[in-house]
Amino acid sequence: MTAMILLIVLPIVAALLVGAVRKNARLLATLPLVVAGVSVLGFLLALGASPLKLAGAFVGPFTLHFELDGWRLLLLAFVCAFELMTGIYALQAVARAARPALLVASLLLAFGSAAGVVLTSNVLVLLIFWEMFLLALYGAIASGGERAERTAFKALIIGGASDFLMILGLMVYIVLRGSVIMGAGAPVDIAKTPQAGLFAFVLIFLGAGAKAGMFPFHTWIPQAAEVMPATGFAALPASLEKILGISFLYTLTSKMFVLDGRARAIMMVFAVVTAFVVILPALVEPNLKRVLALTAISPVGFMIAGMATSAMAGMAGALMYMLTHATYKSSMFFAAGALEKQAGSDKLVDLRGLGRATPVLGWGFALAFLGAASLPPTGGFMAKELIFEGLLHHHNGVVLALLVVAAVLNIAVFSKVLAVLWERRPEVAAQRMPGSEVLPAFLLGMAAALTGLIFSLATPAFEVTLGPAEHGMLTAMWTHVGPLTGLSLLIYILGFGVYLTARERAASAAETFGGLVESPVTGPGLRMAAAGKLDAYEIGLKVVDFVTRVVFRYLERLIDVVVDGIIAGGKAVSGPALSAIHNGVYSNYLAWAVVGLIAVLALVLM
Amino acid sequence: MDLQTTALAIIAIPLLGSLLIPILGWLRRGKLTGYVAVALIGTAHVLTWTLLGPAMAGTVVSFKIPFYGNMVNLSLTIDALAAFMAFTSSLIATLIAVYSLGYIEHGDHEPEYYFIVTLFLGAMMGLVFSTNIIFLYTFWEISALACWRLIGYFREPDYIWKADKAFLVTFGGAVLMLLGFALIYGQYGSFEIAELKGKPIGAIALVLILAGIFSKSATVPLHTWLPDAGVAPSTITSLLHAAILVKIGLYGFARLFCNGLVIPHAWHKWLLVFALASAFISACAALQETNIKRLLAYSTVSQIGYTFLGTATGYVGALLYIMAHGIAKGGLFLCAGIIEHGTHTKDMTKMGALFKKMPITGTAYLICALSIAGIPPMAGFFAKWFVISGMMYGWYRIIGTLAILTAVLTLIYMLRSFHTIFLGQSRGEAHHEGAPVMVTVVAILAVLAILVSVFLPMPYALAKVAAAQRTIFSTLAALGR
């Protein structure tokens, strides 16, 4: 019990104390690692205590229910690992942030609230931790300095607005289910409550999807990648946020609701659009961090598709993809931050050959690439096969075909990035990098490559949440060769093939796919996207501005004019007398007040 | 001291004690007046603490001091609702009075300022304990007079016009309300709320009384005096918005219609629509406003709409909302005071990058803004949750949905104001943090905006008792919930 509380409370308390140590740069830089170290210790203690339940009252439905089972333990293991890696990386990198104290406080707040989200079983308490995480994200982005402030604002507005949708959905959900405890009692069957159930589900789905980076709530992510410190991006949007968002989506689709055809169809639409919407921009993007951010969005579509199948295979695949993705993407971001420091730029063209020149980073990135490309034996391979199996199981052939295309293009993007970093450039000389900035990228890259093994070992944890019916499903897939294995092979071949074909037409690896911008088919869309004209947030703000302007000018101001007119008319009659009384002489006011009091008393006594 | 004496002391100390302040002014002890005001208001607040225990235990004490036959008695009731309001209002008023020590530096006018502020709080205290309609009205009007003088405090012609506007709108509404009270007396022969409990109110009397309540609580369309009242010193706008004036209207509604007369069921949905429209229209106005005090004023109008929604669908939420909004909005206006002192402007477009010079004020502003927006873990979230979650039944779900969309607007204008004022590039002259006493008070309010969440079980328990003591049920209770 102490360990569970420690994992949540310690980072939050430490975040509150950052102000006191903000002037001590060394202490500030060390704080995340110290807290992460204690958290890992707490996790190890919790390991021995699992399973565990903790319940207490707070106010109304906001009861303090916390739970630790095998699945949550696995999630916590990943959360703690990311905390530890972030703590190590932060030792040197924090000093480079424009607002280091804000960055450290935000990281710590994110650590505590992420643990809270994982451990709580009360959906309302989850919401509170979730919002605290949003505040941490806002702070982490804003720690990038003045140029990051606009993006921080955008992230908070998108996150806040989608969370309000989720709050509304939860309000309806609680009425329908009569309980705030996730997993208690029977889930809400949407087919039996066709209007309210679907309404609640869609709203919560949008909120959870927004957290995971689903279309159309994703547009802040590439911008944040560019302006926020790599430490913050690797820890929050790239890893912890994805885990929180997707794991809640899983809870939503498996424990809170029984989906019907409409709910699945809605999810599939969002899944496909999310998988595709940023692929083309990612192919032509010249900034490494933006490429990585854009490619963090597409996998969310795969995960949502897996959830939408409601099949064990699809769900297991989505969860594995979530963990694999968080691992390889944070590795890549840590590497990108270190490479940016080396080159003084985050442009692909300036990073050519740097992976080769800094082999530990380069290999870390390459290992992470294995996970990103879903090559065996990574968890990504298992995940995609399971998602495809789920889709086949539900006869979603069209969605499957579309996701296959998206997977092919994803591999093409990553191939391009890897080729740029490993380009032969003898003139590139790397500076010596501090171990703390190299190690996290390498270790996480290695972990990404080994996720398949980790998942096989952690099969019991998956079974806790997925159910024992699928016993053996996860391990059997290593020995089972079927049509889906062939499909995976086809994806690899096509993905590398697409890249190599495009590479032949480009002057350098960094310029590969550059022709898409000039193409009459893809060019206009890409240029509009680059100008922000397709950004749902910008469009939404314009709509809000228009509506509020109309209401303000033609309703609120009109009311004021009418009220002023009535008062002016009244004053024209009584004005001279009032002006004489209201002359700024204090004793006159007092006299008037006394006369008024006497008048009131007289009225009362008459 | 028994509860009766305590209640009388809570009213009398600021109300009668305020008369000492002009005397000190005449004796040329103007500098002392601020401390005397703080002592009077602070004492009243400390005394409210002694009411909390009995109120939480469900104790209700009512007593009458005969005044004029059987018709007009000084009837006071100490119950959970009164204790909650008295505690919240006096807490915020005390902090504002302390802040005033650093804010008000106008020599000759200091005694006048502190006299009226103390009188203002005294009127509020009288109002929250009164259960005789005539006394309730009397205290109501004392507050209107105090408000009028304080809005025109700086004496410029435009300011005096705006003070007159505030007075005339609220006074006009109050006169209509008085007519409504007369109709009730004609119907039931009593001004005692206890004797009117559970009795239905006629449509005409209801409309007349609501005119008074809505004008006082600045509900659309009787709200435009409140943004205009931003010409007053920031301490006063803070008092108006956070602690006293607009809360009087809300309290009046709660006392009259949740603990007394019964509103016909057909009116319920229209009241909700009215409250929601008020919340939405003023949120739209806030998004278009560039004057910081006017923006915050529109925000108050919007949030008052939520509180009215809460009185019908989530009484506990409505009371928590009064507390959460009072603390956060008080903090925001006091931050606005520091900003105005430092920049000599209220125009947000002429500010920017103030966080570097005013880190404590900036942090306090952000925390209070997030609380108003209803972002957890700030207190405003819980209040908003309890208010809106009560609307998830039947067609009320539409109202709840629109209320949530309005909450999104709140988040946008609150966060945008923070970014415009404190972040980005500087667009004005050099600035500095406020006086230590002022900064301390805004920091306390910001901390309270969070601490109320941590210690929420206490105000929640009190609000629950207040809800249980209602004599009529909420709209949803009438629906069978």
Image (tube, coloured by chain):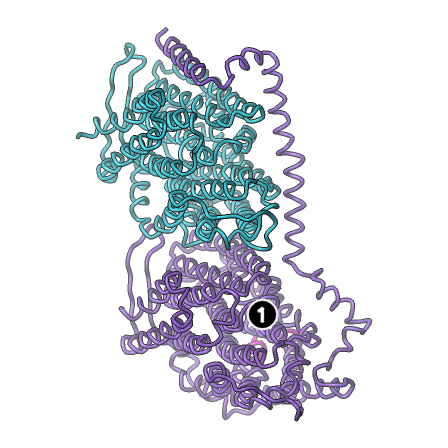
Rendered hue of chain B is: cyan
Q: Residue furthest right?
A: A520
Q: Residue furthest left?
A: B1
| Residue at screen point 54% across, 33% down | B227
| Along the line of sight, the residue nearer the viewer: B275 or A473 | B275
- Residue B257: x and y in percent read 40, 28
Q: Amino acid at mark 1?
A: Ala
Q: Is residue B401 visible?
A: no
* First to last magenta residue range: A387-400
| Along the line of sight, the residue nearer the viewer: A163 or A251 | A163
Q: Is residue B402 above or below residue A335?
A: above
Left/right of residue A558 with respect to residue B321 in the rendered view: right
Q: Is residue A194 above or below residue A583?
A: below
- Residue A201: x and y in percent read 51, 59
* Residue beneath disc 1: A225
| Residue A605 included in the magenta stretch of the image | no
| Along the line of sight, the residue nearer the viewer: B281 or A109 | A109
